[in-house]
Image (cartoon, rainbow, N blue to C red):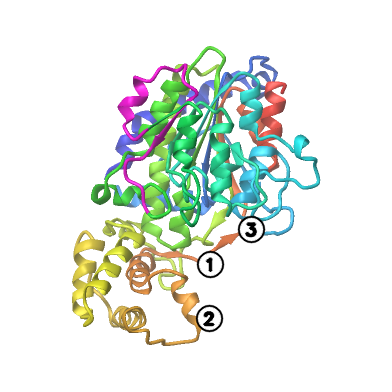
Amino acid sequence: MNHCLEKLAVWFLIGLTIFALSCAGQEQIIQNSQKPKYIFLFIGDGMGQNHVALTQSYISAMDNTVGMGNLTFTGFPNFTDCSTWCKNNQITDSGAAGSAIACGEKADYGVISYYPQFAVDSMPLSIAKIAHNNGFKVGIITTVSLNHATPAAFYAINESRANYYEIGLQLPQSGFEFFGGGGLRYANGKNNEKADLYQNATNSGYVITSDLNTISTTDTSVAGVYFINPILLSESDMPYSVDRDQLGGVDLKDIVKEAIRFLDNDKGFFIMVEGGKIDWASHENDAATIVNEVIDFDNALLEAYTFYMAHPDETLIIVTADHETGGLSLGNYSNDYDSNFAMLGLQKSSIVYFSELLADYKQSTTVYDINHVYEMAQTNFYNQPVVFTGEDSVNVSDAFNLYFYGLKNGSEKELYAKYGSSNAVAVVFGKILSDRAGVGFTTWAHTAAKVPVYSIGQKSVYFSGNMDNTGFNNRIKDIMGW
């Protein structure tokens, strides 16, 4: 994959845009009274600054150069970072972080835009609801389920992000014109005892489809469109981008492109796009899949940037994350200064996908062969043969004995530190590559690290300087006079 060549023309256009903006002067931009008509908010779930830097380093390494390769959003003229702590914990979750971004108020860990200190009828509204109340059409897009924490924060209110069914009921109640990406987790309740959420949306006037072509032929007078990726995994999520060749489904960029076309109107729109599985890959410490998810996220953002180039005085694009996941580092104790991020290009499927293959193998027989597991890795996980060291062999053997025979080589705490909650064998084969690449992780969970904020377009300088995640809602309201 030559990502730099694909992005070269875009990077040139971004450079021209930045030059024009700098010539105009920041003060002139701030004083410009014209408000953006089109607002895009891109959220890379779990995407810390090192996730971005790793992806840039990988792009350069794959082009046999040293440096930081080009992503669309890293060329935006405004950059800052943003604090992410939630109301009752220094390390946040997506529920509280998404709520802060959407509503402009710190929330408790695990809630969905729920603020018990306010009366029910006076809780802070999400910026998506405020935009909708002011005549904007609204789109909510994600690679995970639509009733997952981050997308839910923009249309729902609930005291717990785990109440998927109750959150899903609120999707059509929002009246938002476009939803797209994943499905609805627990669409019939956790015990399949409740009325179908998809039917509920249909009854509310939404057109539900898994065919992108249907969107282009749907009359915009309908209550709304809900595009569901034709391939969904166990949690109603889209496949990782690295697994789409094997599993199928559409790309995030194609959904964003159709959403823009469907929502474009004289009054304007607000679109939130979440790269939700950057976070999930980070929870797996799956460096190669992280890189592919960030690139997939950037490709989707390119659709917004292309739209911006046609409407530069009317469009605002903001890119950020809800929190950092994994404690990712560029450099590790194994390699010292000898990182080789191109090693990540040897991985052709996600740790999760390979875990499923291993689970199928475990279920299909009772006598397990470690040599067969090596063959599975060379065939299904790596795209060219990998030579294993003696230390690799020991680690694979330990993971093999644990997963297939329940033989533990360490305490529960030690095993969790090595494998997290994932398939031990798949984790080890992934770690072999990430270690050689020079990628490190400190945790399987979130961290309190600040996250990046990039912006371009009308009034984008408002998203610079010192920022907290409550600032997105408040600054957009200031810009728009809402």
Was residue 431 drawn as part of the magenta stretch in this picture? no
Mark 2 residue type: Lys
Q: Name the spot of residue 369 as percent of width and height, x first.
A: 20, 80
Stretch of the chain drawn in magenta: 209-233
Q: Name the spot of residue 59 as percent of width and height, x first.
A: 35, 47
Seen at 37% across and 87% down, the residue is: 407
> In the picture, which quadrant includes the C terminus?
top right
Q: Nearer the viewer, residue 282 or 232?
A: 232
Per the image, label 1 sits on a secondary structure element best described as loop
CA distance separating discs 1 and 3: 12 Å
Label of residue 448 in the image: 3
Label 1: how many Cα within 10 Å (few below 14, some 14–19, many 20+) = some
Quadrant housing residue 454? top right
Which residue is label 1 attached to? 443
Q: Is residue 260 above or below residue 239?
A: above
Q: Seen in the image, is 216 located left or right of residue 101?
A: left
Label 3: how many Cα within 10 Å (few below 14, some 14–19, many 20+) = some
Q: Is residue 65 visible?
A: no
> In the picture, which quadrant includes the N terminus?
top left
Q: Is residue 383 visible?
A: yes
CA distance separating discs 2 and 3: 22 Å
Which residue is label 2 attached to? 413
Mark 1 residue type: Thr
The first of marks 2 and 1 along the sequence is 2
